[in-house]
Structure formats: structure tokens, C-alpha cells
């Protein structure tokens, strides 16, 4: 697992809880940014990071739509019901 600070782990765990985006995907990329090295397959790390970013964007979009009184985006509802992804 990538090295991370306690506060960073707390933030990433909260992002995972709220959006379903894997904290480890962000942690690996942040570690790479700090050290210049990546653990394991760099393409797999990038792919996991892109999927995590997508989940965050979809979740935020759903939250904004919901806050504006609009109907929730169906992808957001799917995300909420499948947090284990």
C-alpha cells in the first residue's frame, strides 16, 4: 500500500465512504507524485485513479443536482446502491 499521512488517510477514507471511489487509487497516485515511484503496474494504477475520479465526479454531480432541487441523476443512485465497487 502506498505511504500516506494519517490525515490524508482520513480524508481519502471519507471520500471513499461518500462516493465509492477507492481511497487506495488516490493514495497510490499521491505517493507517486511525492516519490516519483509507483508500486506495481503503472497502467493499472492510472486506470484505478481514473475510475475513482469518475465516481467522485458522478457523486458530486448528483449532490449538486439534489441540492438544486432537481431529480437525482440515475448514475448517482446506482453509485449509492453499489458502494462496494
Image (tube, rainbow, N blue to C red):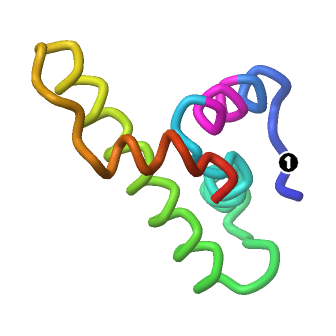
Q: At 23% from the left edge and 21% from the top edge, which residue is drawn?
A: 66
Q: Is residue 23 above or below residue 49?
A: above
Look at 54% across and 44% down and name the residue there.
81
Which of the image's four quarters has the N terminus?
A: bottom right
- In the image, 24: left or right of 44? right
Quarter holding the C terminus is bottom right
Residue 26 is situated, as x and y percent measured from the top left of the image, at 62, 51
User: Which residue does the image show at 21% across and 13% down from the upper left?
Assistant: 67
Q: Residues within 10 Å of mark 1 (few under 14, many from 20)?
A: some
Which region shows up in magenta? 11-17
Residue drawn 73% across and 72% down?
A: 38
Place residue 50 in its image quadrant: bottom left
Q: Is residue 19 left or right of residue 16?
A: left
Between 39 and 56, the one lying in front of the other is 56
The x and y percentages for residue 61 are 24, 36
Q: Does 14 appear in magenta?
A: yes
Specify the principal SS of the magenta part.
Answer: helix
Seen in the image, is 76 located left or right of residue 39? left
Residue 64 vertical placement versus 31 (above, below): above
Whole-percent x and y of residue 37? 74, 71
Q: Which residue is mark 1?
A: 3
Q: Does the magenta portion include 62? A: no
In this rendered view, identify the residue nearer to me: 84 or 9: 84
Question: Is residue 33 placed above or below 37 in the rendered structure?
Answer: above
Amino acid at each position: 500500500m502506498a505511504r500516506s499521512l494519517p490525515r490524508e488517510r482520513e480524508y481519502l477514507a471519507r471520500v471513499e465512504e461518500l462516493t465509492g471511489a477507492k481511497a487506495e487509487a488516490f493514495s497510490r497516485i499521491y505517493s507517486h507524485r511525492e516519490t516519483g515511484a509507483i508500486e506495481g503496474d503503472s497502467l493499472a494504477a492510472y486506470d484505478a485513479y481514473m475510475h475513482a475520479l469518475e465516481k467522485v465526479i458522478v457523486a458530486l454531480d448528483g449532490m449538486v443536482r439534489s441540492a438544486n432541487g432537481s431529480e437525482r441523476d440515475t448514475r448517482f443512485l446506482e453509485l449509492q446502491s453499489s458502494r462496494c465497487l
